[in-house]
Amino acid sequence: MMTHVSALDLLDRLNDENGNYAEVLDEGSMRVEIGRHAAGDAAPKNPHTEDELYYVVAGSGKVRVGDDVHAVEPGDTVFVERGLEHDFFAIEEDLVTLVVFADSSNPSSYSLRE
């Protein structure tokens, strides 16, 4: 089976849903979402039950994974091992990321820290 999704369609869907995340696909062992965080915002996240890979599509800011901090810009990838706290912050330009969740056995495991 093949799934094809246009990046422009994804951004339109994100705009239509008026939220921070939109699901791209869910194939059991892998889930993919597109996310957006506005400039000036911070996006703290609870540790997840699956490994994650963030691909930065647009924007810039910083990411913290555990105790490590890095600047991010388009084309960067960030791996987050399951169970690690992580967040995007100091967002200078609206940050758009493609997020891949591996070994997704609990689709409701993704949530914002309060």
Image (tube, rainbow, N blue to C red):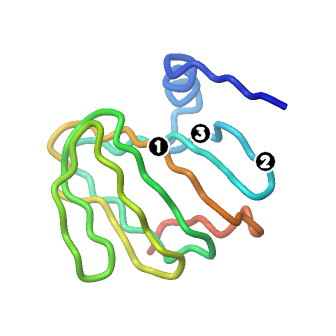
* Residue 5 picture location, percent across and down: 64, 23
- Quarter of the image for residue 102 reads bottom right
Answer few, some or many: residues within 10 Å of disc 1's Cα (few below 14, many 20 plus, some between 14 and 19). Answer: many
* Residue drawn where x is 36% and y is 34% of the image: 57
Q: Amino acid at mark 3?
A: Ala
Reading the image, the residue beneath label 1 is 35
Q: Is residue 53 above or below residue 111?
A: above
For residue 45, side relative to residue 43 (left or right)? right
For residue 97, side relative to residue 29 (left or right)? left
Reading the image, the residue beneath label 3 is 22
Label annotation for residue 60: none
Label annotation for residue 27: 2
- Quarter of the image for residue 58 reads top left
Give the quadrant of the C terminus.
Answer: bottom left
Inter-mark Cα distance, 1 to 3: 7 Å
* Residue drawn where x is 40% and y is 45% of the image: 55
User: Between 3 and 94, which is closer to the camera in this rendering?
Assistant: 3
* Residue 103 picture location, percent across and down: 70, 66
